[in-house]
Amino acid sequence: MCGASKIAYRPVGLALGAVSGLAAGALFKQAWKVLGHDEDAPDATDEDRSWPEVLLAATLQGAIFAVVKAAVDRAGATAVRRLTGTWPG
């Protein structure tokens, strides 16, 4: 892909990143509820939560974010190839 095409894809990539962050946050919130924990996931500085609970929440949130981001990025790149005939990476 030429430099101009990569630059043109950059705003699309940023928008997809924002969408993936929102989607990942919503999925994490639902997953935390399904696991039977409180309504809100613990923060690292939440004094009333245990180490295992805080670390479990962070692990789950990170895994969900990584999977959603990869799926959205891959879908965006595939759509760009369909539209332009070139891969945006």
Image: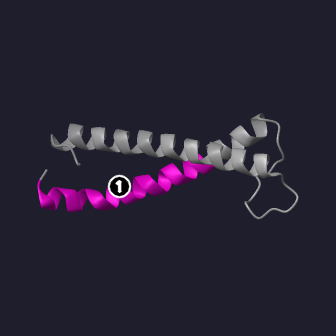
In the image: residue 59, left or right of residue 1: right
* Residue drawn at x 58%, y 48% as measured from the top left: 62
In-front residue for pair 9/50 = 50
Residue 75 in the magenta stretch? The answer is no
The one of 34 and 58 positioned closer to us in this rendering: 58
* Image position, residue 5 (x, y; %): 17, 56
Q: Quadrant of residue 17?
A: bottom left
Q: Residue at x 14, y 61 (%)?
A: 4
Q: Going by the image, does 23 lie left or right of 37?
A: left
Q: Whole-percent x and y of residue 13? A: 35, 55
Q: Residue at x 26, y 56 (%)?
A: 9
Identify the image quadrant of residue 27: top right
Which residue is most to the left? 2
- Across and down, in percent, residue 60 comes to 64, 42
Assess whether residue 8 is covered by the magenta stretch.
Answer: yes
The number of numbered discs placed on residues in the rendered structure image is 1
Q: Identify the residue under disc 1.
A: 13
Residue 45 drawn at (x, y percent): 76, 65
Image quadrant where residue 3 sits: bottom left
Residue 28 shown left or right of residue 66 in the figure: right
Q: Which residues are magenta?
A: 2-25
